[in-house]
Image (tube, rainbow, N blue to C red):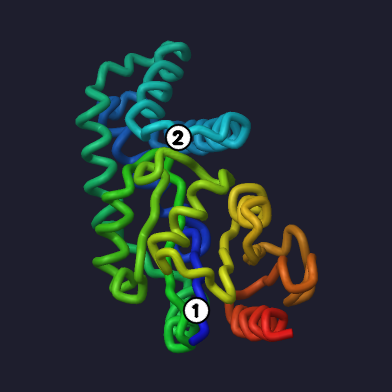
Amino acid sequence: MSVKAITFDVWGTILPVEPAIKVVADVLTRALGGRVPWSSVYSFVHEERRSLKLARRERQEFVPPTYNLYRIKRKLKERGIAADFDVYEAQNEIDKAIGSLDVRPFQDALDALKAVKDDGYKVGVVSNILLWRSGATRELLSKLDVAGLLDAQIYADDVGSVKPSPRIFEMALTVLVGDMMPDVYLHVGDDFYEDFMGALMADYGSVLVDRGGLYIKKEYHEAVPCRAYIIRDLKMLGVITHQMESCEAR
């Protein structure tokens, strides 16, 4: 019997990340007592998120979200802002707000999840965390009825490791299929380094979702035959899974 596994990134791939960033800005604006305009806090959160992601990329080590909030608090104080809020309270507020976020999954992602599930794939998510804890994402996926389409959810705090480290992909595969060697294992994500290159470095199939057309203008590009693909829309994922299966059958 054929064993097939596929994992998806969450934020930016299944769910839009922008509403979540706004939630962090909302919580921090309230924590600062409204002394700083929301637009300034929002820009600051965007700036810090980029900086934290770059630092994570360079070190490839897991840093808890609460630690990242401590860093944000310190940076605010360096700018002369009286950031005297309790970091743990702020973290709990962010997690609570993320868990109940009013957001819809990308339709192409929802359709793709259902399609691969119907096609016999073991389906999971592999996600880094940055400003909110994995429990918040789990709660949101459950609320949105996405969790029911998944056989496993693996987050950086479960493994103590972050994408692009092979360790997190290997853990996901073990949870999904145990000791069996799958005929196909494919990871799908929107981040070129963490998702696309991470899966390739772990020696697995890789799909980059390039909705903004940063890397390709056409709908589909086979970057490495039978290994790596770039697509503009997840409606093309079925083409790739069938091609991967054909490659394995040769």
| 148 lies left or right of 247 | left
Q: Residue at x 37, y 33 (%)?
A: 64
Q: Position of residue 212 (x, y in %)?
A: 66, 62
Q: Nearer the viewer, mark 1 or mark 2?
A: 1
Q: Let me know if residue 47 appears in the view.
A: no
| 148 lies left or right of 42 | left
User: What amino acid is labelled 2 in the image?
Assistant: Phe
Which sits in the foreground, 233 or 221? 221
| 236 lies left or right of 99 | right
The C terminus sits in image quarter: bottom right
Could you classify mark 1 by the number of other residues whose Cα lies within 10 Å: few (under 14), some (14-19), or many (20 or more)? Answer: some
**How many numbered dots are placed on residues in this image?**
2
Q: Let me know if residue 84 appears in the view.
A: yes
Could you classify mark 2 by the number of other residues whose Cα lies within 10 Å: few (under 14), some (14-19), or many (20 or more)? Answer: some
Which sits in the foreground, 77 or 94? 94
Q: Position of residue 27 (x, y in %)?
A: 29, 38
Q: Which residue is labeled 2 in the image?
A: 62
Q: Residue at x 29, y 57 (%)?
A: 138
Q: Secondary structure at mark 2?
A: loop
Q: Position of residue 184 (x, y in %)?
A: 58, 74
Which disc is residue 164 wearing? none
Q: Secondary structure at mark 1?
A: loop
Which sits in the foreground, 61 or 32? 61
Mark sitting earlier along the chain (1/2): 1
Q: 243 above or below 76?
A: below
Q: 218 above or below 62?
A: below
Real-space Cα separation, disc 1 to disc 2, in angstroms: 30 Å
| 217 lies left or right of 31 | right
Q: Residue at x 39, y 50 (%)?
A: 155
Q: 225 above or below 159?
A: below
Q: Residue at x 64, y 85 (%)?
A: 242
Q: Which residue is labeled 1 in the image?
A: 3
